[in-house]
Image: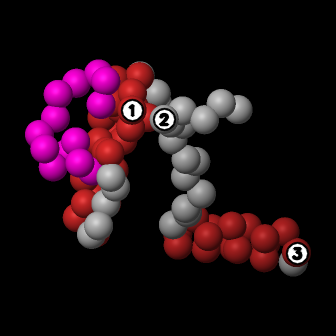
Amino acid sequence: MNHINWKEELLDSAKFNKKQENLLKIGSKSLTDSWLIGVLYTRWKKLKRIREQPSPNYSSGFLEWTKKVDNTDKCQS
């Protein structure tokens, strides 16, 4: 798999303010900088039309669980 330098691609594709440009070139130094880098990464994915597959919903409610337990108890008796 080829390594894609999304930061360089994003810098070449649009104009940014100084803070955003420095973050893309140098990197983050704080938590809020990391958040902004995440926003810029999302912006790059939108420009490239990259969509991640939604994760499947494995959660189930308590009522569903109790119905399954009740059905299991009925089958065993």
Q: Quadrant of residue 42?
A: top left
Q: Is residue 46 visible from the viewing direction of this image?
A: no
Mark 1 Cα within 10 Å, few/some/many (few <14, many 20+)? few
Compared across the picture, whether 60 is left or right of 13 comes to right
Mark 2 Cα within 10 Å, few/some/many (few <14, many 20+)? few
Q: Residue at horizontal 78%, vertical 71%?
A: 72
On the image, the x and y values in percent for residue 74 come to 79, 72
Compared across the picture, whether 9 is left or right of 39 comes to right
Residue type of the residue flagged with mark 1: Glu
| Residue position marked by numbered label 2 in the rendering | 5
**How far apart are the alpha carbons under marks 3 and 2?**
58 Å
Q: Earlier in the sequence, mark 3 or mark 2?
A: 2
In magenta stretch: residue 45: no
Give the structural element (helix, strand or loop) at label 3. Answer: helix
The residue nearer to you, when weighing 66 against 27, is 27
Which quadrant is home to the C terminus? Answer: bottom right
On the image, the x and y values in percent for residue 2 come to 65, 30
Q: Residue at horizontal 27%, vertical 69%?
A: 30
* 31 relative to 38, above or below: below
Residue type of the residue flagged with mark 2: Asn
In magenta stretch: residue 21: yes
Q: Residue at horizontal 69%, vertical 67%?
A: 68
From which residue to which does the magenta span run? 11-23
Q: Which mark is residue 76?
A: 3
* 19 relative to 69, above or below: above
| Residue position marked by numbered label 1 in the rendering | 8
